[in-house]
Structures are given as structure tokens and as C-alpha cells.
């Protein structure tokens, strides 16, 4: 018989609109304190995530995901959930140095991440 386990409670984010997909990833130690909705890039060498900075040269300069909740990865790796597809309020995103909504939008569209400006 299947065993079910409570894995916690997820509170819907008002900036994560409509349908979305998520997965568990590791935020690299030294990434610092990151706020929810931070645009992340993936380090090519180890597959861990950090805030995407346009001037980076380790692979993380390419926006890859959006952080679902704030984390403190100042001194240790942290496992957390990131959004890998869906619609998101563009005004809620936390962008790394050098990135603009224009610079991340084209990349995100290839990953089925859509940036929108909610009406209302």
C-alpha cells in the first residue's frame, strides 16, 4: 500500500500567475540571502543555482528559473523550489546586475516562462 507523507504547505504566490511548473534545486553556498522571485542562473560546472548576473561567465549569466521563496545561502547550500515554466508578474521579479526585463524575456520564452503585466 502507498505511504503518503505531508511535505509541508505551499502558499500560492500572487506574482506566480495561472499555471506553472516547479522543481527542487540547490542554491550554491555563497549566493547570499535571496528574495523570492529572484531570477536565477545555473552554474555550468556544478549544476547549482545563484542569482543571474549579466556579466557572469560561469553559465549563471543565462536566466534559467525563478526562486519561489526567499533563502539564505550565505554559508551553505540550500535546497529549495524554483519555477521553471509558467506566467509571472514581471514587476515582481528581482533582477541581477545588468539584466533588464528585455534581456531576460527572450531567454525565458524559450523555457516557457512568460513575463506578463497583470491588468487591474
Image (cartoon, helix red, strand yellow):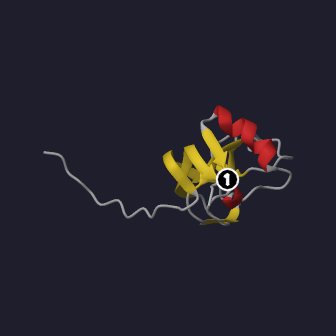
Q: Secondary structure at mark 1?
A: loop
- Whether residue 44 is visible to the viewer of this picture, yes or no, is no
17 or 68, nearer to the observer = 17
From this view, report whether residue 22 is shown above or below residue 96: above
Q: Residue at x 18, y 46 (%)?
A: 2
- As drawn, the residue found furthest toward the front would be 120
Q: Split into 4 quadrants, where in the image is the N terminus?
A: top left
The spot of residue 32 in percent (x, y) is 70, 65
Q: Residue at x 67, y 57 (%)?
A: 38
Q: Residue at x 35, y 59 (%)?
A: 7
In which quadrant of the rendered view does residue 14 lie? bottom right
Q: Residue at x 69, y 52 (%)?
A: 39
Count of residue discs: 1
19 or 2, nearer to the observer = 19
The spot of residue 25 in percent (x, y) is 54, 49
84 to the left or right of 92: left
Q: Split into 4 quadrants, where in the image is the C terminus?
A: bottom right
Within 10 Å of the Cα at label 1, are there few (<14), some (14-19), or many (20+) other Cα atoms? few
The spot of residue 80 in percent (x, y) is 52, 56
- As drawn, the residue found furthest toward the left would be 1
Q: What residue does disc 1 label?
A: 117
From this view, report whether residue 94 is shown above or below residue 41: below
67 to the left or right of 18: right
- Whether residue 17 is visible to the viewer of this picture, yes or no, is yes
11 or 44, nearer to the observer = 11
The spot of residue 97 in percent (x, y) is 84, 55
Amino acid at each position: 500500500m502507498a505511504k503518503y507523507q505531508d511535505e509541508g504547505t505551499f502558499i500560492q504566490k500572487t506574482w506566480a500567475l495561472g499555471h506553472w511548473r516547479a522543481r527542487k534545486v540547490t542554491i550554491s553556498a555563497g549566493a547570499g540571502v535571496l528574495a523570492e522571485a529572484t531570477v536565477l542562473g545555473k552554474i555550468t560546472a556544478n549544476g547549482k543555482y545563484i542569482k543571474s548576473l549579466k556579466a557572469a561567465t560561469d553559465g549563471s549569466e543565462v536566466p534559467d528559473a525563478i526562486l519561489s521563496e526567499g533563502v539564505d545561502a550565505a554559508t551553505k547550500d540550500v535546497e529549495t523550489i524554483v519555477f521553471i515554466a509558467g506566467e509571472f508578474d514581471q514587476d515582481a521579479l528581482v533582477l541581477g546586475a545588468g539584466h533588464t526585463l528585455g534581456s531576460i524575456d527572450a531567454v525565458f520564452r524559450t523555457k516557457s516562462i512568460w513575463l506578463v503585466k497583470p491588468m487591474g
